[in-house]
Image (cartoon, grey):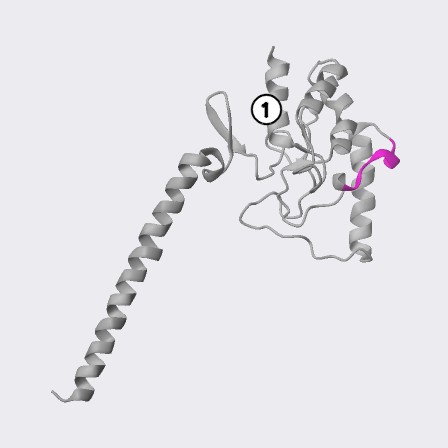
Amino acid sequence: MNTSVRNTIRLLWGALRALLVLTVVTGILYPLGVTGIAQAAFHDKANGSKVRADGREVGSRLIGQKWNVPGTDRPDPKWFQPRPSHGGYDPLSTGSSQLGASDERLLRAVRKAREQVAAFNDVPAAKVPADAVTGSASAIDPDISPAYADIQITRVARANHLVPAQVKKLVHQHTEGRDAGFLGEPRVNVLELNVALRRLAEH
C-alpha cells in the first residue's frame, strides 16, 4: 500500500471519528443535558405552559383559542374573547394577513369588526381598542390588552349572573405588567382569565 493511499485512509478514519464524536456530543449528550436542565428548572415552560382545569388540560397559556358557542362560529357571551385571528387560531397555520395599513380590504375589515365588537359588548365604537379588531403577527396571540378586557366585563358578568365588580376584580388579578418593568405592554391571558371566571361562576 503506497503512502498516498495510507494517508487517505488515515484522513478518512480521522474524519469518521470526528463525525462519531460530534454526533454523540451534539446529537445526544447536548440535547439530553438541555432537556434535563429544562425539565428540572423550568418544568412547566418546557412542557408547553399547559393550563389545567377540573383535572384536565384545557390549553396552553402561550396559544390563543376560540371561545365560541359550542357547535357554532358565534362568540360565546359567557367568555372573554381573544384578538381576532385570520387563521382561526390554528397553531399549525400561523402568521399575519400581510395586508398593509393602507389596504382598503384591511380598513373595511377593521371597521366591520369594530362595529361587531361594539355591538357585542354594548359599548360605543370609540371605546373599542385596536387589539379587539386587529390580529397579531402570529394569529394565535393568547393575550389581550386590559382595555379590551375592560369593555367585556359587563357582558361577561351579565351572561354568568355575576356582579360586574367581581369580574373587574378578576381581570385586575390576571393583568400582567410589562416584562422587567419596561418591555412590552400590560396584558391579560384569556385562557387563564376564563378558567378563573369559570371557577367564580360555579361558586
Locate the N terminus by quadrant: bottom left
Q: Which of 106 and 100 is in front in this view?
A: 100
Q: Where is residue 159 in the image (x, y as percent from the top left)?
A: 71, 19
Visible in this render: residue 68?
Answer: no
Q: Which of 50 and 152 is in front in this view?
A: 50
All told, the count of numbered labels is: 1
The stretch in magenta equals: 124-130
Locate the C terminus by quadrant: top right
- Mark 1 belongs to which amino acid? Val
Q: Is residue 161 left or right of residue 89?
A: right
**126 drawn magenta:** yes
Q: From the viewer's perspective, is residue 102 above or below residue 1?
A: above
Q: From the viewer's perspective, is residue 160 above or below residue 118?
A: above
Q: Which residue lies furthest to the left in this view?
A: 1
Q: Is residue 50 left or right of residue 191?
A: left
**Neighbours of disc 1 within 10 Å: few (<14), some (14-19), many (20+):** some
Q: Position of residue 50 (x, y in %)?
A: 50, 33
Residue displayed at 82% across by 56% down: 104
Q: Quadrant of residue 178?
A: top right
Residue displayed at 32% across by 61% down: 22
**185 drawn magenta:** no
Which residue, given by chain and number where applicable, does mark 1 sit on?
A: 195
Q: Which of 97 and 193 is in front in this view?
A: 193
Q: From the viewer's perspective, is residue 99 above or below residue 1?
A: above
Q: Nearer the viewer, residue 10 or 38?
A: 10
Residue displayed at 64% across by 46% down: 139
Q: Where is residue 84 in the image (x, y as percent from the top left)?
A: 70, 42
Visible in this render: residue 114?
Answer: yes
